[in-house]
Amino acid sequence: MALTPRLELRQSQQLIMTPQLQQAIKLLQLSNLELTDYVEQEVEKNPLLDYADAAGSEAAAETEAETAPDTPAASGDDGALGPGVDERLSEGGDSNARDDAPLDVSYENDFTNDSPADAPREAGAAALGADWSSASAGGYDGGENRLEQTISGAASLRDHLLEQLSLLDCTPAQRLIGQYLVDSVDDAGYLVEDVRAIAEKLGAEEALIEETLTLVQSFEPTGVFARNLGECLALQLAERDRCDPAMRLFLDHLDLLAERKLDVLRRICDVDDDDLNDMIAEIRTLNPRPGDAFSSERIQPVVPDVFVRENAEGGWTVELNSDTLPRVLLNARYYAQVNGAARSKSDKAYITDCLTTANWLVKALDQRAKTILKVSSEIVRQQDGFLDHGVIHLKPLNLRTIAEAIDMHESTVSRVTSNKYIATPRGIFELKYFFTSSINSSEGGEAHSAEAVRHRIRELIEAEQPGKILSDDKIVQLLRDSGVDIAWRTVAKYREAMGIPSSVQRRRLKAVPA
């Protein structure tokens, strides 16, 4: 067949991911704290964006409505939520619908322009005279200088050790080695580098390193600079003058204690049952991580993105955490000012681009909030039994069920539930927590949630007596008697995932006196 050029007309469809749509999808996956950082960067880059404040948000919003490009919108209902669930976006504000809203959101709200943020505090003039208000350090300025603001932060473990090193009577070489040892200590207080490796790096003899290590091991808290758990506990026992030969043998075989092989440990230490029990009790009074009291690592508390509260009608009210939502608006007055003063094409193109970006960000934040609220409300509706009665009533749930109920795509629901937390009367949970696989019922009834089954396994093990340890087979039998059709392998998998030892290990563990 000859090859000849020809023209053909074809019709096809394809999905084009615009940059704005990609950014909107990215916003869905961010938590409120991550979103705040993102918005701060956008406000710094875009001169038309500004944070809403209590005094000027209403006026700015009115000006924005007059000068910003018109957006076709129609008043609409945000959808029936069904009995028992009340969905709230923010205090006040009417919902508007858009036909072309992306991200499966068919309505929007202007809460980002109308909801006031905390106004910045103004430091007033001091009422006690200029000499007080102009003091450079510790002076009274009539404002926010309080006693708790002058207290210094807690010292880190490194600072604490360096302070003791500066008071140590040693040679300059030992002081240099000691400073290197301080830098080689982890947050728990353990020396993470080997003595031989330190000697090679510093070009010193191992004997000098060992000698210096012995000096710094006398620092507080007792147990720092230990190279392993046994040495850490030995340092603390030596301070109490309790590190006798039997105790040293005990510390050399801590692995036997972890495996609950008390008979073997008793023979090695050559002690009777009472002495072994006393040694175990004394070990439990020691601190295996002496550096934790000086840990400088900040623990970020979980900040919920959604609140669930019981309302007066006996149902549930779902609200967004507006305290962590960034409130931004388009500074339309400044736009009108700079747009009128722009002369060159590049200046006008820049202002137009900033206007488009600002409008998109305000609407994208609103659509993100509405989407999160819609998904959270449906999860609460599906898992109302959990809120009323606890984990044992958690239902099997997957992304498809939520997506079909609220007419969204599964990928959208997946992004919304990532890195988001919901505060309920039963605690704070990640939204992903409510999505669990199902386990069939042995009686042919409704399936059970895997999380509820794990909770039931934990309850059975915690309630067992030392003389009646439940094996995995026994747990399977008890669960099947209660209507859960589960296999032995599944019970073992759930038990190991929860960090619960086997029946043999639990029997040894409960045999050890508390």
Image (spheres, rainbow, N blue to C red):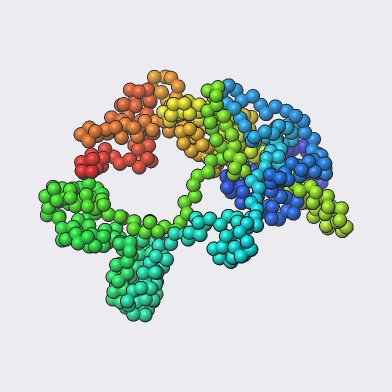
Q: Is residue 323 visible?
A: yes
Q: Residue at x 50, y 28 (%)?
A: 383
Q: Nearer the viewer, residue 390 or 153?
A: 153
Q: Quadrant of residue 511?
A: top left
Q: Residue at x 15, y 58 (%)?
A: 246
Residue 168, horizontal then vertical, whole percent:
33, 74
On screen, residue 237 above or below 34: below
Q: Residue at x 29, y 67 (%)?
A: 218
- Which residue is most to the top? 444
Q: Nearer the viewer, residue 502 or 66?
A: 66
Task: Report the quarter where the N terminus lies.
Answer: top right
Q: Is residue 303 left or right of residue 457?
A: right
On screen, residue 339 above or below 482: below
Residue 382, horizontal then vertical, whole percent:
53, 27
Q: Residue at x 54, y 63 (%)?
A: 138
Residue 350, horizontal then vertical, whole percent:
80, 55
